Image (tube, coloured by chain):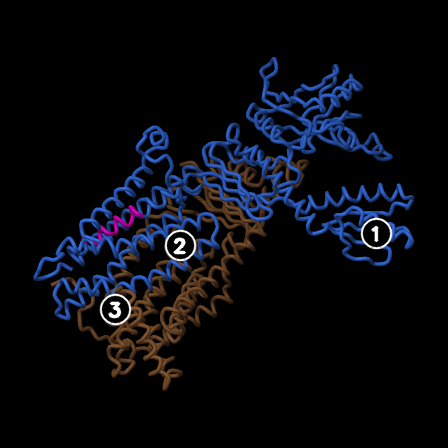
Amino acid sequence: MPWEIVKPGTHIDFIGKRHIAAAVSGLLILASLIAIPIQGVKLGIDFAGGTEVQLKFAPGVDASDGAIREVLTGALEIAEPSVVRYGEEDHNEFLVKFPGNINEALTGSEPEAGDADVVGTDLIVNLGRAIEGAVGTVSIERVEFVGPRVGKELRSDGLQALLYASIAILIYIAFRFNTRYAPGAIVAVIHDLTITAGIFVILGMEFDLRILAAMLAILGYSLNDTIIIYDRIRENMELHTSLDLPVVLNESVNQTLSRTILTSGTTLLALTSLYFLGGAVIQPFAFAMILGVIVGTYSSVFIAAPVLLWLERRYGKGAAHDRAEADKKKKAREQRKSRG
Amino acid sequence: MSLRWRLGSVIALVLLFGWLTVANFIPKADRLESNWLPDDGLRLGLDLQGGIHWVVGVDLPTAVDRELDFVRKNISDSLEENGTSVPSMEAVSGVLVIHAASPDDVSAIEDAADDSGVLRSADIDGTTLRYELTSDWEAEIRERTMLQVLEVLRRRIDDPVRGIPDSVVTRQGADRVLVQIPGGQIDRTRARKLLKSTGFLEFKIVQDQDVNEDLLLARYPEGLPPETMVSVERDSETQRVSAAFLVPKSPDITGDFLEDARVGFDQQQRPLVNFRFNPEGGDIFGTLTEENIGKPLAIVLDENVYSAPTVNSKITTRGQITGRFTSQEAADLAVVLRAGALSVPVVIEEERSIGPALGQDSIDSGVAASIVGLVLILFFAIGYYRLSGVYAGIALLCNLVLLVGLMSLFDATLTLPGIAGLVLTVGMAVDANVIIFERIREELRGNRSPRAAIATGFNKALWTVLDANITTLITAVILFQFGTGPIKGFAVTLSVGILTSVFTALVVTRLLFHLYPGDRQVAALSI
């Protein structure tokens, strides 16, 4: 006998649990919607602008975030720096972030060199020198600086990317399926993105370009899951026109359940490996993706199908039969196409 | 297509891309030497090989203001010729503001402005007239300035002969330049100097000098003589002022006439920069030095005095710039002088610099994450689907080979997020196989023969696989469109990965099923 994660003939009543699912999701979404404005979305330097410097001290240098902060706020006159230990404990690395602009350089050097931008001298050089003098031998491993104008553009590009991706997918679903499937898929996607973003905000993690990329990948992944279930629902609706909608929905979710679990499983395997081994720079991305995959899998099972049921009951009565007919014709066309 | 044909083409394809993939692991020098390996291949992004990534903003408004100022002088000249009293005029933030002395002058000013051919009236309020450059001309000025700046930066940084090897200077949008300098060749401070030096060289006869500004200014209690200014010399180490000079505001000769500049050494082996003027510059310089023998001549670069040697004799085309520089600094100065001056300043708007050690760390951890992820998934697939799992595993490996090979074929750039995309692709690529295998299992449960189950499984799963992957492809393409730098790398691996994984699941896995069981009547399918 093959190893089966979901035994054939499993009939879990997902649809019957839709009220519980709705309550859970509702709570999570509510928590996200409250947390996002209250705690505020923490934008990384990609979107907010600012400077990020990764420092690596020579082995044996007794560096602490307090000592580094003292140099930054003291000699360099940097307002509101954030200093955290970075990467693995024994690496002696720190990540320094501050809202300043590296072009407005030269604090911390001789007063007569007060020129706003003397060529060849900038904040990063001064920062390296000052920290080396006060704390110990250090190398600057990474500098990221995003000026205010670029930050603004990246922000608007990011929002546009999310917007256009949603529109393009909406069009695709409406075109491939039928307009009544699209809202369910969109609800599921908004559900996933809101909750993932909410958890991010609650955990105080920063949004940057990598997280945006993760969000878009989640958008694609979550839809992917939902579409596979919808595909099956559509197929079953044609096969069993006499059955009640809730039965068909349950049947479809159960039939695709093993696939849903298996694919999430392999994706999570890959992501977990990325999270633990991929290094500190990629960790937030892997974390966001793991969250998104879990939430996305949950939503395609517990949210996408019930939303379809709810929409059908509310708006689909009467017209439902005609639509099923139209759907059947379309499907038949596609079957011919795919076989030919 | 017959089975043999299909098998042959898949094997050929995998071998071809395998060859492209494997080539990436062979050092570039060996690749260039061998005649059976491709010269190019996957490029590593700066975040993996280390290096500097700068997005540089070009100050185009300054160029526009300068052009307005130039027009202002012309208007002023033509008004003077006509006998109209010259009004006060000022070019600020793209607008030329003219205050006419009396209302009677307004029409004469308007005529003069019209005659310039490049102005359009923005607003007239009594005797105050505002003009802007016509949009065509402004676009022209901006474009010219961009091209000039781009050209100068190219000569300084990515010149094929004298520049920094493998560096790239390209235009980005209307007013930005992208500068990419791979790591390990130049430190950040030096690179920044090469980038940001305006490179504006001036020669001025010194009229007076002292050890610092305050002492010099103290000699002129009634203010500086007309058309003069103070320039200072700084110690290159401490940036402390070491001397102050009273010099004319406008230079006697500028670096525009330079023909060449090279690093050299004096008798004590101290580095210096030898320069040569073109014949026209030589004439001007000759007259200047001849008339000023015995006086110090300030050599001013970007408003800082480098040195002020005393003119001993008439000098025409050849000269030297001395100063307390290291040979590296002298060489860089020669590069900047040869490349010519930037017509407007540039400012760094975005920076991503990564040290080479960190880049190598990222590669190592990316490779580790990919291999561990791959092995985990292979184990899982084979454990769960047995022989079919082996098929899925083969398909997954083919997928990786095709993905990396395809990216190598197009000399795509692999970035750290790109590696993340690769790992994600490995995780999601199995999906297509899972969809198909689950479908086949279902068909088997419906008491179909293994052969029929395979055929129906593939047919029914086809559109599901396509639907599921097209949505992800859409988001990846949009991410590519809007993403910048390394994120684009993620979008690239993700989208190419989707294409190859659909191909391997639908073609390679299916082919394997055709090979075994194929037409054989097997009792049970190992799935």
- Which residue sits at x=17%, y=70%? A8
Q: Which residues are magenta?
A: B390-402
Query: Which residue is label 2 attached to?
Result: A285
Seen as rendered, the residue at the extreme top is B267
Task: Note the chain letter of the brown one.
Answer: A
> Can I make out residue B233 in this image?
no
To which chain does the residue with label 1 belong? B
Seen as rendered, the residue at the extreme bottom is A318
| Residue B198 coordinates in the image, percent (x, y) | 64, 35
**Figure quadrant of residue B444:** bottom left
Binning the other alpha carbons within 10 Å of mark 3 as few (below 14), some (14 to 19) or many (20 upward) gives many
A155 inside magenta stretch: no
For residue B110, which numbered disc appears in the image?
Answer: 1
- Which residue sits at x=29%, y=72%? A332
To which chain does the residue with label 2 belong? A
Binning the other alpha carbons within 10 Å of mark 2 as few (below 14), some (14 to 19) or many (20 upward) gives many
Task: Note the chain letter of the blue one.
Answer: B
Amino acid type at mark 1 = Glu
Tell me: A154 left or right of A221.
right
**Figure quadrant of residue A251:** bottom left
